[in-house]
Image: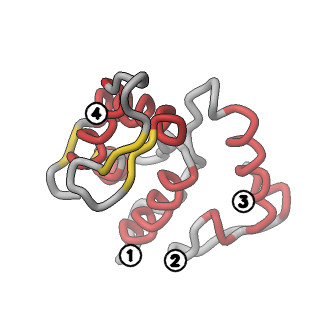
Amino acid sequence: DFCSQFGLRRRWDQTIYEVLPVAGVLTDILTEFSRDYIVSAPVWEYFDGEEWERGLERELAGDRLNGFTGKTVIHPRQIQVVNRSFLVSEKDYEDALRILEWDTKDLLVAKSGDGKRMDEVKTHYGWAVKTKALAGVYGVSKEQ
């Protein structure tokens, strides 16, 4: 437990990314290992009370943004929240499949399926591989 090494404990309304000494260590772990291994985000210690779920959802948003592909849970109540958070949006899934199917002799850059962002093979290929794998594990959501 990295927080224990620094004698720290966060509240339900603080994510691990606000604990700068720990956030730095997590960044190092992701930088070193996430290209070759599945890296699960650290534990969220809250599982009851009025706001624990909202705090967990905030932290999960940071986990996904930073490249974690799962979350360590300590209580069964957390599982549904984590699994819901890692659902892949239908738009991301469709873009990922398009990128993976491109013939790179003819196309390297194009609009996304919804026409709101750019998809580039060189920039987004790794993201597309990861997104397709996450969709296989967590599923695809039309809501996101």
Separation of residues labelled 1 and 3 (CA atoms)? 22 Å
Q: How crowded is mark 2: few (under 14 residues within 10 Å), some or many (20 or more)?
A: few
Across and down, in percent, residue 14 comes to 57, 74
Residue highlighted by disc 2: 13
Q: What element carries label 2?
A: loop
| Coloration of the structure image | secondary structure
Separation of residues labelled 2 and 3 (CA atoms)? 16 Å
Mark 2 / mark 3, whichever is N-terminal: 2
For the C terminus, give its image quadrant.
bottom left
Which image quarter: residue 140?
Answer: top left
Q: Do the residues labelled 4 and 2 touch (CB within 8 Å)?
A: no
Across and down, in percent, residue 6 comes to 84, 62
Q: Residues within 10 Å of mark 3 (few under 14, many from 20)?
A: some
Q: What residue type is labelled 2?
A: Asp
Residue highlighted by disc 4: 98
Q: What residue type is labelled 1?
A: Glu
Residue highlighted by disc 3: 23
Q: Do the residues labelled 2 and 1 touch (CB within 8 Å)?
A: yes
Q: How crowded is mark 1: few (under 14 residues within 10 Å), some or many (20 or more)?
A: few
